[in-house]
Amino acid sequence: MEELLVQSAALYAREAGELVAGLMNKPYGIQQKVNRSDLVTEADVSSEKLLRGRIGRDYPDHWILSEESDGANDPFGVCEEPPAGYGWIIDPIDGTINFIHGTSHFAISIGIVKDGVPVAGVVYNPLTDEMFTARLNGGAYVNGERIQVGSEAALGDALLATGFQASEWRPGSGVVEQIGRVVGTSRSMRIMGAASLDLCMVASGKLTGFWHGGLYPWDAAAGIVILSEAGGVVTTDEGRPYRLSDTTLVASNRLIHDGLLGIVASV
Ligand code: 2AM
Ligand code: CA
Ligand code: CA
Ligand code: CA
């Protein structure tokens, strides 16, 4: 079943990716949600509509959770954890700011959950035409080629990435302190701007680790399956296994994980 779901998700992600890539150079509406870096465009809404339509048509008994329809607060409702059965967790464009600015680091992210457990993930970057796929115990792939995390074993050899909301950035804030420590101890760091793809970059060995606070299930659901299947590990900042109801995520190639947790730990 999961293999079929991955194939369907990849098909829908490609279709949505082509739609949003086609909208990029045309005029489209942009609206602010909470602040000037929290934006939604007509492309986000169109992509989500397409994805919800395809899933509803082909899998009418599966539940769907998606960013622009389900909003920010308490995405699973009163239960906090995903409902039973198969469900699809969708980010119609992850990296909306990159999309708006024409940077080729955004993706359609589709995670599939069964009885609360993430079992499959598809992340598609339409501009680079990279389709990342994974299902539980089936390995992780980009365009059908197996991927694996990197072999850096020391923080000094690690390339790390993070992301944050503009409202978190104040002199002396936790994220400023963390970045200071990372720059001091790792090879270097990046702020790429699309959590789903950042997880795929760790999965394919292009980044060694990644951490991010304030995430929602649709940012992480697909990427955590892809990274785990590529040999990586995803925990909270306290080091316990990451669940979709957690907001802070620390991801790595496993070898540097304890070191990364030490850097990220709040001061
Ligand atoms: P988005 O582009 O789908 O909003 C950027 O660091 C990462 O954080 C992106 O994956 C972005 O997803 C996500 N993110 C989650 N909540 C956000 C918010 N309120 N503002 C900006 N980025 C947010
Ligand atoms: Ca958003
Ligand atoms: Ca997102
Ligand atoms: Ca989004």
Image: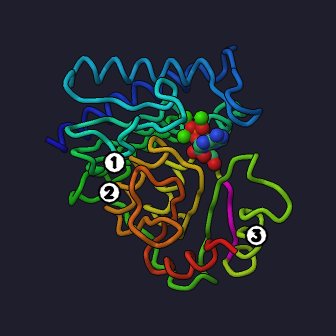
Give the image location of residue 2, x and y in percent: 18, 44
Residue found 70% across the figure and 31% down from its top? 34
* 177 to 62, vertically: above or below: below
> Is residue 81 found inside the magenta-colored segment of the image?
no
10 Å crowding of disc 2: few (<14), some (14-19), many (20+): many
> Is residue 189 found inside the magenta-colored segment of the image?
yes
Choose between 78 and 3: the one closer to the eye. 78
CA–CA distance in space, label 1 to label 3: 34 Å
Q: Residue furthest left?
A: 1
Q: Where residue 172 is drawn, which disc sits there?
A: none
CA–CA distance in space, label 2 to label 1: 6 Å
Residue found 53% across the figure and 68% down from its top? 237
Q: Of the residues shown, which amino acid type is indicated by label 1?
A: Thr
Residue ID for mark 3: 177
Choose between 78 and 13: the one closer to the eye. 78
* 151 to 235, vertically: above or below: below
Q: Is mark 2 within 8 Å of ligand 1?
A: no
In the rendered structure, the answer to whether residue 22 lies left or right of residue 75 reads: right
Residue ID for mark 1: 133
CA–CA distance in space, label 3 to label 2: 33 Å
Q: Secondary structure at mark 2?
A: strand
Q: Where residue 140 is drawn, which disc sits there?
A: 2
The residue segment tinted magenta is: 187-191
Q: Of the residues shown, which amino acid type is indicated by label 2?
A: Ala
Give the image location of residue 239, x and y in percent: 46, 73
